[in-house]
Image (cartoon, rainbow, N blue to C red):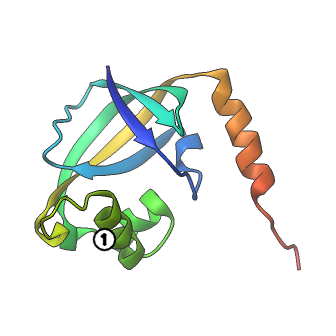
Amino acid sequence: MIQLDFTSNPNGKLFQDVFIDIRLASQAFTEGTPVQIVFKGIVLGDVIIEEVSQVSFSGISKTIALINCGRSVAYQHTLLSRYYNQGKPIVFSQFNILVLRWTYRRPAQTELITEWWNSKTYSTT
């Protein structure tokens, strides 16, 4: 089974029923493929790829950036540049936008959800 590894989850997208992820287009992904989600070495469960679409680095929209990382397009570009720095300019790269839907969640995910929410501080004033 394909495995997608995550090192952070700042906007909580991994806790949504359906979420997106951006990966290099050189990685082969097919709709209907089951994928295992791993967060900091902990297997959270399985998702299925619902849709795959391609976008260029410059084609990443504000909507895609907000849904994927919860921040601006510039911030999304910075993340991709850091993660996929392979000795060639990332601005010429193509990316897959993966739409992923959970099919099985392990108990470890519930613990991480609780920790994630507890780490957030909100002001009511």
The spot of residue 48 in percent (x, y) is 36, 28
Quarter of the image where the N terminus is located:
top left
For label 1, the residue is: 61
On the image, the x and y values in percent for residue 37 come to 45, 32
Q: Residue furthest front?
A: 87
Residue 104 at x, y percent in the picture: 52, 21
Question: In the image, what residue occupies the spot 27% across and 49% down?
Answer: 23
Residue drawn 18% across and 41% down?
Answer: 27
Viewer-closest of 28 and 83: 83
Question: For this rendering, which residue is in front, 99 or 95?
Answer: 95
Q: Nearer the viewer, residue 106 or 83?
A: 83
Q: Residues within 10 Å of mark 1 (few under 14, many from 20)?
A: few
Residue 117 lies, with reference to residue 111, above or below; the image says below
Q: Measuring 35% from the left and 43% from the top, which residue is drawn there?
A: 99
Give the residue displayed 37% in from the left and 49% down from the top.
21
The x and y percentages for residue 11 are 57, 58
Label 1, secondary structure: give it: loop
Please determine whether, in this image, residue 83 is positioned above or below residue 41.
below
Q: Quadrant of the C terminus?
A: bottom right
Q: Quadrant of residue 88?
A: bottom left
Asked if residue 66 lies left or right of residue 21, the reply is: right
Q: Amino acid at mark 1?
A: Ser
- Specify the farthest residue to the right: 125
**Is residue 108 positioned above or below 100 on the image?**
above
Q: How many marks?
A: 1
